[in-house]
Amino acid sequence: MNDQPTGPQLATVTLDAPIISGDVTIDQVKIRKPQAGELRGLSLSALLNLDYAALENLLPRITIPTLTKAQIMAMDPSDFTQLGSEVMDFLLPKGAKAALSPTG
């Protein structure tokens, strides 16, 4: 059995509109691949459809630095979409990614 993780477990998103929080400016956010327990109470289909409410609940669990719901609510839509796209990429099985690949 192979215990090594496959594929990227962390993605970095450079924000188009940095988040200002007090004296701190957040211009990059790292997203960890969620573990099954971090998906509790969420619909996988909602996450794959980039549903706002589902992502608003998941992102604080898997972002570095940890984004608050208020920061997510105030986020530029293009940045929110980038974060959601990374989450979607983590959730898709390898076979689905291969089928969607233009070279595959």
Image: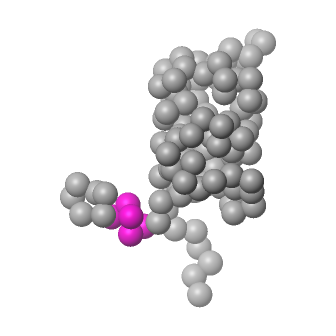
* Residue at the image position 21 percent from the left and 58 percent from the top: 103
Q: Which residues are magenta?
A: 94-98
- Which is more toward the observer, 30 or 35? 35
- Which is more toward the observer, 18 or 47? 47
- Which is more toward the observer, 70 or 9? 70
* Residue at the image position 54 percent from the left and 20 percent from the top: 76
**Residue 15 visible in image:** yes
Can you say whether 28 is above or below 100 in the image?
A: above
Residue 2: x and y in percent read 57, 82
Can you say whether 87 is above or below 100 in the image?
A: above
- Residue 53 shown left or right of residue 49 in the figure: right
- Would residue 8 be counted in the magenta stretch? no
Main secondary structure along the magenta-highlighted residues: helix
* Residue at the image position 69 percent from the left and 63 percent from the top: 36
Can you say whether 27 is above or below 46 in the image?
A: above
Going by the picture, which residue comes out furthest to the right? 22
Residue 45: x and y in percent read 54, 54
Count of number-bearing discs: 0
- Would residue 95 be counted in the magenta stretch? yes
Residue 59: x and y in percent read 67, 40
Going by the picture, which residue comes out furthest to the left? 103
Residue 104: x and y in percent read 24, 63
* Residue at the image position 57 percent from the left and 48 percent from the top: 46
Report the quarter where the N terminus lies. Answer: bottom right
